[in-house]
Image (cartoon, helix red, strand yellow):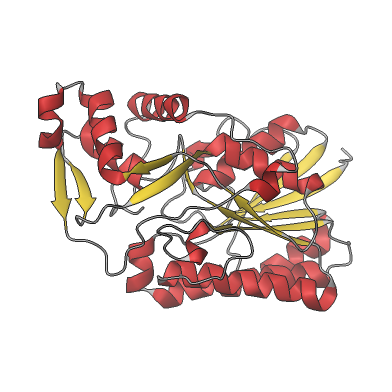
Amino acid sequence: MDFDRTVLVTGGYGFIGSHLVCSLVNGHPGWRIINLDNLDYCCSLRSLESIEDKPNYTFIRGDVCNSRLVNHVFNTENVDVVFHLAAKTHVESSFESPSSFQRVNVDGTGVLLGAARSARHRLQRFVYVSTDEVYGAGLEEVFDESSPVKPSNPYAATKAAAEYLVRSYWDQYKFPIIITRSNNIYGPRQYTEKVIPRFLTLLQMNKKCTIQGVLPKSRHFLFVSDAVDALLLLLDAGVLGETYNVGTSCEIPIVQLARELVRMVKDVPDEEVNNWLEFVPDRPVVDLRYPIASEKLQQLGWRAEVSWAEGIRQTVKWYQDNPNFWLDISEESG
């Protein structure tokens, strides 16, 4: 079968990656979608059960740091587009093992860039998916794409370093890159180390929501389908060499989030909600909030379509319907 376009998604079994792969496979039957993933602890084969037999889907198990494999993929598959999502993302783990984050997030990105640039087939787009955490903490300031990068943890530092590496290929070779920086993305199939599935899984086990520290932390939450829509829009409408914030106005204090999920899952009276909260020691370095401006992306026509009420309803229902999808719990991360 001849395909109009070949799209390589790295980290396609991850949370965002699996939603992107499903959208591409189902929405573009004339495109070939290749998923390169090493199936790390936060991945599940069940995430892509619905599309694994589709004729336009191919899975390659492998590490983005494996230069021999990555070069082989680019030299044999005529890749037109790359969505690079493969990364280590757990903030606490990045303090414990910064070198492993350096290897995957920075070195792996370098391997992909080198292989893509040297391939015989000309690449049309290399979309690098970064994070709002590269900006560091924002109190009153709202970050736009020109704001300085000041990461405050090893995870964010490796994402910022990878961004500089990606941009250097644009500056030196006019390699067709686009960078995205998004708020906290949530939705079905997210691994339990992230704050929303962490709280939901604890509540399903009749355990309290563990809240790190007492400082008034809040996060902006973006539903996963809106994040995928932004990536698909940038595939053709994004300007090469540019960075785009993918943000939302939905900012929720973590304590308020926990209370809302307690009400939804446990259905207890208001006077008993706080009984389901437990404050635990904070992480070594914590950013209170990450406010970003997304006017640049909105000028291309993107808007977040899923309200918080609808997004969290869908998310809670999915975890209630799939209580055994993730069998273990890792530490909470914002």
Out of 217 and 85, give the one closest to the viewer.
217
Provide residue 16's location: percent of width, then percent of height: 54, 45
Q: Is residue 286 left or right of residue 76?
A: left
Q: Is residue 140 above or below residue 328?
A: below
Viewport quadrant of the N terminus? top right
Q: Is residue 227 left or right of residue 27?
A: left
Q: Is residue 116 left or right of residue 87?
A: right
For residue 58, say whether it is visible.
Answer: no
For residue 41, say whether it is visible.
Answer: yes
Report the residue at 45% width, 55% height from top. Answer: 290
| Residue, far front | 140
Out of 276 and 42, give the one closest to the viewer.
276
Report the residue at 44% width, 78% height from top. Answer: 99
Please tell me how many numbered marks the rendered image carries: 0
Out of 320 and 172, give the one closest to the viewer.
172
Provide residue 104's location: percent of width, then percent of height: 53, 69
Report the residue at 23% width, 34% height from top. Answer: 259
Provide residue 260's location: percent of width, then percent of height: 28, 31
Report the residue at 44% width, 67% height from top. Answer: 155
> Residue 196 falls in which quadrant of the image?
top left
> Residue 318 falls in which quadrant of the image?
top left
> Residue 136 falls in which quadrant of the image?
bottom left
Provide residue 128's location: percent of width, then percent of height: 66, 59
